Amino acid sequence: LSGDVAGNDWLASATALRGRNGERFEYRCPAGGAAGRGPYGTEVYADHSSVCTAAVHAGVITFANGGSVTIEIRAGQDFYSGSAGQNGVTSSSAGSWPGSFAVIR
């Protein structure tokens, strides 16, 4: 992991970490969370998505229990494909965006 916890709430995104491709960061998602922005994508998410909400979509944590999430920063993609109803979260599709992340655990 690279440094300290990068976010501590359900609205935190990864935009401030853009360009640090391959580096991993931890986010802490409090129990009793609610969906934040997005997420945009499936498996790889646009970096303006809520990291915690993407982690619920990816099946790593739940809104009820929250938890610690590790993401890896990735390069931007030309397209992000959404998916319906994964773990109670529907992600949206999005066009080209300059930064991404993947939920590792």
Image (cartoon, helix red, strand yellow):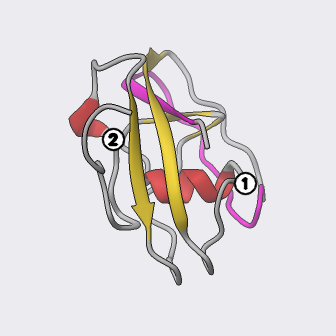
Label 1: how many residues lie within 10 Å, few (<14), some (14-19) or many (20+)? some
Label 2: how many residues lie within 10 Å, few (<14), some (14-19) or many (20+)? many
Residue drawn 61% across and 44% down? 105
Residue drawn 63% across and 50% down? 91
Magenta-drawn stretch contains 44: no
Place of residue 43 in the rendered image (x, y in percent of width and height, measured from the top left): 66, 34
Decide: is 21 above or below 18: above
Of the numbered discs 1 and 2, the one sitting upstream in the chain is 2
Residue 38 visible in the displayed image: no
Structural distance between the alpha carbons of marks 1 and 2: 19 Å
Place of residue 40 in the rendered image (x, y in percent of width and height, measured from the top left): 53, 42
Q: Are marks 1 and 2 in contact (CB under 8 Å)?
A: no
Residue 61 visible in the displayed image: yes
Residue stretch rendered in magenta on the structure: 86-103
Magenta-drawn stretch contains 97: yes
Asked whether 7 or 12 is in front, the reply is 7
Dominant secondary structure of the residues highlighted in magenta in the image: loop
Residue 25 vs residue 34: left or right?
A: left
Give the residue number, with chain letter if any, for mark 1. 59
Q: Amino acid at mark 2?
A: Ala
Residue 86 vs residue 12: left or right?
A: right
Residue drawn 33% across and 41% down? 14
Q: Which mark is residue 30?
A: none
Place of residue 82 in the rendered image (x, y in percent of width and height, measured from the top left): 66, 41
Which structural element holds mark 1?
A: loop
Asked whether 75 or 96 is in front, the reply is 75
Q: Which mark is residue 14?
A: 2
